[in-house]
Image (cartoon, helix red, strand yellow):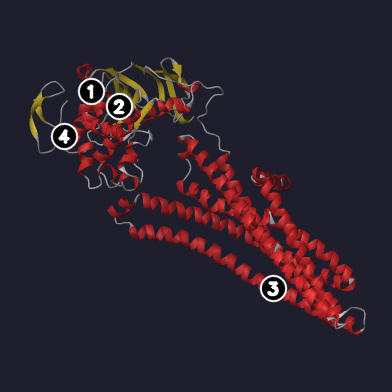
Amino acid sequence: MARVQAHTIHGGFVRVLWRLLQLLRKYWGWVILAYVCLLGTTLLQMAVPWLIKEVIDVGLGRRDRGFLVIAAGIIIALSVGRGIMGFGLSYLGEFLSQRVAYDLRNRFYDRVQRLSFAYHDNVHTGQLMSRATADVEGVRWFINMVALRIAQFIALFVLTCVVLFVLNWQLALVVFGCLPVLAFVAVRTSTHLRPVWLAAQQGVAEMGTVLQENLTGVRVVRAFAQEANESRKFGAKAKQVFQANYEASRLQAFNAPLMTLIVTLATALILWYGGRQVIQGQLTLGGLVAFNAYLAQVVMPVRMVGPLVNVMARAMSSGERIFEVIDAESAVKEKPGALNLGQVRGELRFEHVSFGYNSASPVLSDVSFAVGPGKTVALVGSLGSGKSTVVNLVPRFYDVTAGRITIDGVDVRDVTLSSLRASIGIVQQDIVLFSATIRDNIAYGATEASDVDIVRAATAASIHDFITSLPGGYDTWVGERGVTLSGGQKQRVAIARTLLVDPRIVIFDDSTSSVDTETEHLIQQALAHLMKDRTAIVIAHRLRTVMLADEILVLHQGRVVERGTHSELLQAGGMYRQVCELQLRDADLSANVGETVRDPDPFGGASSVPRGGTR
């Protein structure tokens, strides 16, 4: 069992490593140039200690001033060449790593955008943000520090070892007696660092989740005076990150002096043994100086084993987390050769549709209804009855588990997602406006729209007068998620956004029930424009909205239990009447408290009901 697990881990490591290296394929020309700079830097670095040996043995030993001048010039030329090559290597390393990070972030973001709602239902936003930032940065470091420079360290190590044996094989054996100890310390430290870094990465992701949720729900936090509790939650996560990073720093702080001590002992041993050989004439003074310089060069790659392994381990973990999202299978997929829906008439049908987020808990069961072109159907029901699920199935945010949904007789699963959703306009319950101008928010689905079209849509949505009353007009900046606007204003901006797209099918979640009389009247006007000559599905929370519908469907526990017009369902005296009495009419009353007149009772008698807008 342990052998199988080890094989799986090794296979996963190799697979992730290969995929990360594949990210460099499109930049192969730049990679080759980077390796040319790398080879040049290594060769020039190797040449300098040997030249110093010749200066000491020949220039100083023979007192040859001309040779010293020539050697000094060569050393300067080598240093300049090495500097140019080093600059090229550093520049190309950063360029390639940043390009890979750029490509990876875009692939990641594009994939997140295309994953179905079912995926996002189970993944924390903070986790995705952490993968798009910290994990991509971990991969970038791997490309720069490992994928490119590992070859330099290997070449430097091999060439230096050869030169050491050429200079003096006895001293070389002394060096090689110390290198395994140095390598052991580096690898051992890296092994201890890997789980610590992984814990730090996970801690950063969890801390990001807490921060994101707190900032998103900042008004709820303030309303319930939970600032101290939220600070404690964030502090606990921040402490985990601190402890993990502190432990990593402690290990590194212990590792660096220990490795320096080992190198110092090796240097002292070489000076002692090599000095005796110089005295005995078995080694020149220049050879001893060069040997000591080459020792520093051969130690450097060995000392880098630990940090490089650590960067690689971090990158493999980051790559695995990133590819987990990129490889995620969306529950909603386009068929090969999917059709373009094109211009639609708007005939919408649900044919024996069933749906469940999982097999154990069905949400909809055998739902069937039809909405003709230009007609409106209202969905009514208690919380959890399946209303939102019905409207989420039309644009294929989720796919049905049984039955089918058709538009103009075509199964929505047989058409491209882009053409399907281009035919559907949605004003959702949770209205999202972006941190941009009101103009940009209205034109979000039609970025090429002219100012005249934007104003026309805003006017139809009964929001133009409000916008022009603002100091910045249409260029007024909207706060994050539209927090600077009221619920009714956001809803009308969302209606204008949908009107500008001019879809044949509209879905409207009439979610803002507790609004004042004037706002309700404006929303009703906007809604009338939105539904005019369009096929509409409305999740109704107001009595007046329900009465606009050509047909009303009453849902209960995922089934259509009643259907008909407002008057027909009231006369039937079933669940619809109960829903009206308990929910819809209460919403109307709460929206218009203080303005009560005698009006016909929609339930069959006369009663005092509020007047708020037109029915």
- Give the residue at the far right of this rendering: 281
Give the residue displayed 20% in from the left and 27% down from the top. Answer: 544
Q: CA distance from mark 1 to mark 3?
A: 80 Å
Tell me the number on the disc at residue 538: 2
Can you see residue 363? no
Secondary structure of the residue carrying tag 3 is helix
Task: Name the side, left or right, on which 191 lies relative to 170.
Answer: left
Give the amino acid type for the residue marked by disc 2 in the picture.
Val
Give the amino acid type for the residue marked by disc 1 in the picture.
Leu
Q: Residues within 10 Å of mark 2 (few under 14, many from 20)?
A: many
- Image quarter hosting the C terminus: top left
Task: Name the side, left or right, on which 527 lies relative to 178.
Answer: left
Give the residue displayed 28% in from the left and 31% down from the top. Answer: 457
N-term mark: 4 or 1: 1
Residue 237 at x, y percent in the picture: 47, 58
Secondary structure of the residue carrying tag 4 is helix
N-term mark: 1 or 3: 3
Secondary structure of the residue carrying tag 1 is loop
Task: Name the side, left or right, on which 456 lies relative to 67.
Answer: left
Quarter of the view holding residue 53: bottom right
Q: Nearer the viewer, mark 4 or mark 3?
A: 3
Instruction: Report if the CB atoms under discs 1 and 2 are less than 8 Å apart.
Output: yes
Give the residue displayed 35% in from the left and 23% down from the top. Answer: 505
Q: Residues within 10 Å of mark 4 (few under 14, many from 20)?
A: many
Q: CA distance from mark 4 to mark 2?
A: 20 Å
N-term mark: 1 or 2: 2
Q: CA distance from mark 2 to mark 3?
A: 71 Å
Q: Which residue is mark 3?
A: 258
